[in-house]
Image: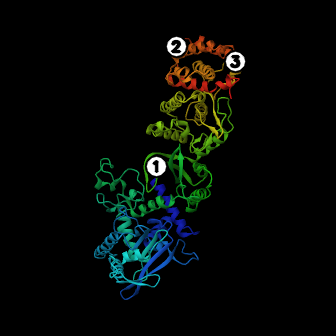
């Protein structure tokens, strides 16, 4: 996985920095770039300048005087717009916002109440730090000596020509004077220093070496407890006799294992962490580029995550691994396709971000995909799961089945389409339907249930089984499904006329919505889908009722393959009729018939008693005069005689088929008053 991230970053850099002439050997090109032109790497290794458009430059003007000049900040060196390019101003943010700045590239902010920033305290600390570096006898110490000579000038000429003696004016230092005299600004600007050679920080080789060696590698990729190790082997690129950094992954913004926490390395003390996790700075910089540039958000609103999708309803990264030996141009198609996809997303409608797999599945350069469930913010962290070796051929196979599934029809399948927003049951490669399929209704009361780690684990297992065509662990699946079913049942008990959602699919003035009935029908649809994709076993035989009018409700789509399941299903239809009748008569259904299923804990042996209670009520209501009801009772009766009182059916099977039958009541036993 880490190697795949590295490859994506290397391809990204080669395309960014070489234009149309992609080098044949990108690895060799990259190492030469680091050695000969490290300044070109800065925009990819330091913080993005973001929306900053202006830079104020302090430069030598006369004896004991510098001047402050203003320039526009431009991204493209070839732009017709005259100004300072971003690569000349490498800015590195520190974890401690109140600490000294690492060099003479400073973000100047403005607040109408506080004035310009950074504060004088921070700028005093910064000057002290510059002095320490200048006296440290390091290769870059002469550069800081030069910068200090400029910053120790007494006078400064402002852009309007006015000359200020910062000492006489009461400023702590020249930087503090410049920060203040820049004046009110609508946004953040850069403040920097041009050295005595006329070079900006990013143009000076000593400053470049300082950032690469001392800051980017030394402070970003190592810690006091796990320092760099010299003359070791990088565990990613396998280069020997290099300095490796134990905190390289975390420093690059990829926090896969809480590596800075004591005890995170099983059996290895923190000082020995490099043996398992350490990378060379070359690899670490590529991973930083992957996190902060390859994954940089795009789209019309700059809010779309490249290589991101909601897999099984949860945020995930899709990481492609490539076939070995391919030319860079072949791999670059993946970056082009993803970038174009993000750029072309509609800004005024909910774009189907989760169709990225549909786009990449046909790319012939991809060996397989890795799916990583994680949060992507300042770092890739909070990793909760991973699926490896997802084959494009399997995705293409699933895509064909998904296309065929659009034409599936059966009386047990939903009539009301729900394919929008969070309630989207449409089959796709991202398996987004797993979100509404397992979602527990109930609002805030159900928040903890919906955030359950066990629930997420089951959805991840389902996704892995679908992608790998492995058999599903059905015990875990049904445990979570029945938990969801009981939340729907609880909602029906608590809501006024809640029984209606157990009988009807939802169609309102604002469009379709999900009810318990709709959920059960979609569950039945997805059970059939799981059998088609090979993660559940398809029944070899199918029960067929005697009544012709009932036969269309059975078949392979129903999963009903035994008389016991058929009995529960048909009894569910009759039970639904009782709910309908009681509701029409003004009976408190929640306190009456709804309580008979004991919150969906019945077993097969309980069905004869339930049948007798339903018959007793329907007789009292004279509902059995209906020919359709008589027909159904006759079919149930024949099954009951064959099965006897000891019906062998598990709790899950009993309640699922009761619910499925109940969801079909208004179809099998339509009421004259139903709407």
**Element under disc 3:** helix
Q: Nearer the viewer, mark 3 or mark 1?
A: 3
What distance separates the C-alpha of mark 3 from that of mark 1? 54 Å
Frontmost residue, 17 versus 605: 605
Q: Residue at x 51, y 16 (%)?
A: 605
Q: Name the quarter where the C terminus is drawn.
A: top right
Above or below, 120 against 441 in this view is below
Q: Residue at x 37, y 89 (%)?
A: 63
Q: Position of residue 156 (x, y in %)?
A: 39, 83
Q: Which residue is mark 2?
A: 646
Checking the image for residue 82, the label placed there is: none
Q: Is residue 190 visible?
A: yes
**Element under disc 1:** strand
Q: Position of residue 295 (x, y in %)?
A: 50, 57
Q: Residues within 10 Å of mark 1 (few under 14, many from 20)?
A: many
Q: Nearer the viewer, mark 3 or mark 2?
A: 3
Marked residue nearer the N-terminal end (3 or 2): 3
Q: Which residue is mark 1?
A: 374
Above or below, 189 against 471 in this view is below
Q: Is residue 201 visible?
A: no
Frontmost residue, 207 versus 415: 415
Rendered image quadrant of residue 627: top right
Residue occupying the far bottom of the picture = 63
Q: Which residue is mark 3?
A: 628
Marked residue nearer the N-terminal end (2 or 1): 1
Q: Residues within 10 Å of mark 2 (few under 14, many from 20)?
A: few
Frontmost residue, 86 versus 428: 86
């Amino acid at each position: 996985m880490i190697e795949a991230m590295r490859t994506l970053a290397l391809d990204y850099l080669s395309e960014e920095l070489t234009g149309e002439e992609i080098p044949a050997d990108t690895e060799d090109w990259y190492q030469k770039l680091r050695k000969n032109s490290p300044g070109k790497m800065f925009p990819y290794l330091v913080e993005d300048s973001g929306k900053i458009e202006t830079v104020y430059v302090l430069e030598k003007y006369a004896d004991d005087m510098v001047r402050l000049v203003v320039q526009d900040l431009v991204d493209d060196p070839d732009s017709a717009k005259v100004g300072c390019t971003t690569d000349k101003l490498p800015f590195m943010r520190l974890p401690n916002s109140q600490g000294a700045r690492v060099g003479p590239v400073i973000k100047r902010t403005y607040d109408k109440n506080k004035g310009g920033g950074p504060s004088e305290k921070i700028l005093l600390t910064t000057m002290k730090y510059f002095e320490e570096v200048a006296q440290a006898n390091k290769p870059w110490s002469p550069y800081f000596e030069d910068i200090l000579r400029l910053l120790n000038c007494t006078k400064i000429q402002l852009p309007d020509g006015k000359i200020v003696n910062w000492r006489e004016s009461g400023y702590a230092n020249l930087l503090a004077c410049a920060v203040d005299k820049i004046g009110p600004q609508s946004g953040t600007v850069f403040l920097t220093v041009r050295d005595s050679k006329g070079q900006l920080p990013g143009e000076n080789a000593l400053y470049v070496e300082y950032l690469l060696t001392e800051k980017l590698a030394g402070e970003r990729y190592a810690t006091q407890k796990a320092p760099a190790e010299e003359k070791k082997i990088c565990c990613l690129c396998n280069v020997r006799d290099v300095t490796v950094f134990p905190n390289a992954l975390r420093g690059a913004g990829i926090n896969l294992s809480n590596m800075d926490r004591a005890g995170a390395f099983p059996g290895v003390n923190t000082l020995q962490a490099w043996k398992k996790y350490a990378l060379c700075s070359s690899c670490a910089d590529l991973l930083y580029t992957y996190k902060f540039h390859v994954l940089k958000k795009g789209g019309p609103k700059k809010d779309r995550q490249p290589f991101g999708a909601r897999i099984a309803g949860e945020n995930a990264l899709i990481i492609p691994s490539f076939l070995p030996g391919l030319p860079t141009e072949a791999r670059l198609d993946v970056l082009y396709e993803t970038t174009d996809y993000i750029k072309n997303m509609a800004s005024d409608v909910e774009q189907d971000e989760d169709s990225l797999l549909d786009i990449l599945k046909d790319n012939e350069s991809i060996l397989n995909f890795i799916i990583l469930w994680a949060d992507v913010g300042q770092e890739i962290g909070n990793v909760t799961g991973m699926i490896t070796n997802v084959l494009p051929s399997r995705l293409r196979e699933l895509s064909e089945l998904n296309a065929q599934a659009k034409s599936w029809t059966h009386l047990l399948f939903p009539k009301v389409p729900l394919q929008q927003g969070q309630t989207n049951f449409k089959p796709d490669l991202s398996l987004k339907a797993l979100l509404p399929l397992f979602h527990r209704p109930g609002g805030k009361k159900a928040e903890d249930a919906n955030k359950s780690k066990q629930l997420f684990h089951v959805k991840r297992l389902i996704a892995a089984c679908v992608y790998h065509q492995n058999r599903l662990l059905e015990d875990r699946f049904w445990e979570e499904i029945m938990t969801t079913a009981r939340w729907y049942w609880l909602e029906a008990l608590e809501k006024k006329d809640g029984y209606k959602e157990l009988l009807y699919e939802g169609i309102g003035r604002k469009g379709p919505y999900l009810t318990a009935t709709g959920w059960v029908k979609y569950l039945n649809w997805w059970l059939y889908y799981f059998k088609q994709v090979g993660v559940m076993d398809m029944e070899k035989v199918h029960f067929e009722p005697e009544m012709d009018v009932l036969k269309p409700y059975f078949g392979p789509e129903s999963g009903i393959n035994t008389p016991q399941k058929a009995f529960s299903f048909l009894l569910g239809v009759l039970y639904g009729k009782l709910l309908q009748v009681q509701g029409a008569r003004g009976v408190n259904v929640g306190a009456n018939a709804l309580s008979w299923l004991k919150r969906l804990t019945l077993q097969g042996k309980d069905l004869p008693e339930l049948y007798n209670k339903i018959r007793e009520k329907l007789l009292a209501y004279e509902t059995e005069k209906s020919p359709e009801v008589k027909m159904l009772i006759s079919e149930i009766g024949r099954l009951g005689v064959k099965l006897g009182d000891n019906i062998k059916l598990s709790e899950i099977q009993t309640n699922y088929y009761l619910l499925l039958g109940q969801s079909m009541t208004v179809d099998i036993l339509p009421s004259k008053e139903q709407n």
